[in-house]
Image (spheres, coloured by chain):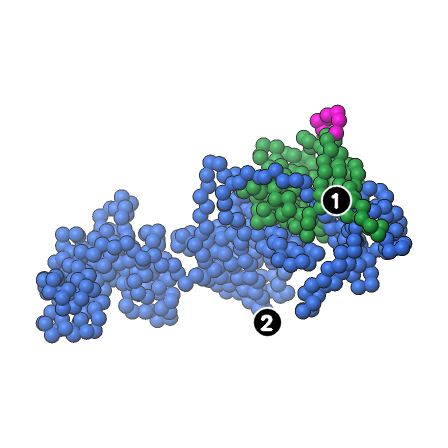
Amino acid sequence: MYACIHSTTVPDGVSLKTRTRVLLECARGFAPTAELTNPGTVVFSIAGLGLLYGPLEIIAQIIADRVERAGIRASIAIAHNADAAILIASCTSGFEVVRPNETAVRLSKLDIRLLPLSPEAMETLVLWGIRTLGQFANLPEDGVAQRLGQEAVRWQRLARGAVVRPLIEVHPDGIFIEKLELDYPIEVLDGLVFAIGRILTSLCNRLVKAGLAADEMIVSLGLEGAEYQQTVRLPLPLDSSKPLLRIVRFELEKHPPQAAICAISISLHTVIPRRVQFGLFIPASPEPAKLELTLARLRAMVGEGNVGVPQLIDSNHPQPFHLVPFSTPQIEEIREERNRPLVLAIRYCTPPIQSILIFKEGTPERLITGKTIRRVTDAAGPWRLSGDWWNADSWDREEWDLGLANGMVCRVAHIGNEWFLEGFYD
Amino acid sequence: MKLFASATARMEICAYIDATGTFDPFSAVATGVLLSQLVWVRCEGNVDAALRSADHLLQAGGFGVVALDLGGISIRILRRIPSSFWYRYRRVIEHTPTILVILGREIVTRSCASLQLKLRPEKTLWVARGGGSGLFRGLSFELLRVKPMRQGTVSLIASPRLS
């Protein structure tokens, strides 16, 4: 069985968008999926609700009460298929329950103009003297197909209440917003976090009901004489208020507002939550909410640009990599690690240490770094490199690999007129 | 890096806490590390931040390998790290499959580590070339197991990556 909530009038002070959102939220309070047929009509399945609430009339009454509490005036119809429920809801007031054996009779009395017919087909039917769905349903199917086309056959089945189709799931506009005007300005972080917690709990309840998660959060604070806005992008979509609140707290501690807060507005950009199919032989990974919280803590501690995933750049630059924000990798097929030969890694000196390299007959002889003088026993180079000369980030250098008397091998680079110790092979 | 390579090949998420910014992702890829599985935390020389980052990551759980690289930190500072950190790390991971690797100039974890290895450079391999300059071919290392103690050493040879 399907229920349809149909609202034609928009109450004063309520926008069409708000009405649609409220209707969808009402529907999602009863079923995980709901179809938004048009901005004022929502249809959803009520299969299984009988076990919870009892007869269909009581279910219809409960839906009507919920819609009324939300401040929307709407008619509700329950029928055995979605289209019959939509057609009946559009021409009834209050609520109406139509049982399967009564559907065709109930639909037969409805006006033909309720069907989504093309203007040409409607004109033809009016010329034929067809005024109700019942009259249209009684026409011979072959004749209708010949004169009005195959689409008319579907309309005729609609008129008979015989179309059974799956619901077309819709998602809301993608942004959940809640605002709070404060009676007194808040000056203390704990008080602010408490108020934000209340908003986030409400927003996350809405997210969970809608089966969605947030991948971006915008915290806007109305300050005394100013505005404060902070955008937090979440690599892993979350639908729980606890980690979101902790992340907001880290952000506020890092970038505290400069005046007392008079109003709070939080908006969450919604996405469909990522479902990961785990397997018995796939290793466990950190729980997404916990991992996101940990990464937020680390970002607050070591800086935004110091936590992430290294990514190589297709360049000949001596350090061809940068950090990108972490996002949960897709689980690929587990592969056996090949028995590769050992590769020497270079351990960079960050920042490179300014040095002096002394040459003798064109070969490096001594490396002076600070107060340390090291004898060069072996040397490989020079390796001359340059690139990006076509933009401001151009680089031009000469590199040497030096074997030192203490057994270490280092890399030095000549940049401009100076030598730098870049790192050690390890 | 070989440890990271095998862990990321098993699709485990790993973390590298880089106390002094020494990590070279290019060398890691050459060893076989899957970078998309690796969280890199750069602490810019802040040992306290590195220790606390390791704590947070271990507490989050679910990581395959967490490496705390203190290789660029002087021995004097390493010796001043309280033992309570190492005991805490040990307690957090002792009943989990997570491997914690601590890299440093000397062994600082005292009795908390279940395996302690010492890697000593043995000799450098150079190919002589005319004109006084040679070609660097690699380093050979001597690997010594300190705990549990085993007599004898293993020799390893590693070659530089080709750019």
x, y (%) of residue A19? 35, 65
Q: Secondary structure at mark 1?
A: strand
Q: Residue A225 has which mark?
A: 2
For label 2, the crowd category at 10 Å Cα-Cα, with few meaning under 14, some 14 to 19 and many 20 or more, is: few
x, y (%) of residue A253? 63, 56
Amino acid carrying label 2: it is Gly
Q: Chain ID for label 2?
A: A
Colour used to depict chain A in the structure image: blue
Residue B90 seen: yes
Residue B67 placement: quadrant: top right
Q: Nearer the viewer, residue B146 or A228?
A: B146
Magenta part mainly helix, strand or loop? Answer: loop
Q: Is residue A111 left or right of residue A417?
A: left
Q: Residue at x 38, y 65 (%)?
A: A18
Q: With respect to residue B144, does A289 lie above or below? A: below
The range drawn in magenta is B147-153
Mark 2 or mark 1: which is in front? 1
Q: Nearer the viewer, residue B82 or A399?
A: A399
Is-magenta flag for residue A47? no
Q: Residue B161 has which mark?
A: none
Is disc 2 in contact with disc 1, using a CB cutoff of under 8 Å? no
Q: Is residue A222 left or right of residue A67?
A: right
Colour used to depict chain B in the structure image: green
Q: With respect to residue A158, does A11 lie above or below? A: below
**How many numbered dots are placed on residues in this image?**
2
Q: Secondary structure at mark 2?
A: loop
Residue matched to label 1: B137
Q: Residue at x 70, y 26 (%)?
A: B148
Could you give the CA–CA distance between mark 2 and mark 1, rounded to whole angstroms? 66 Å
x, y (%) of residue B97? 58, 35
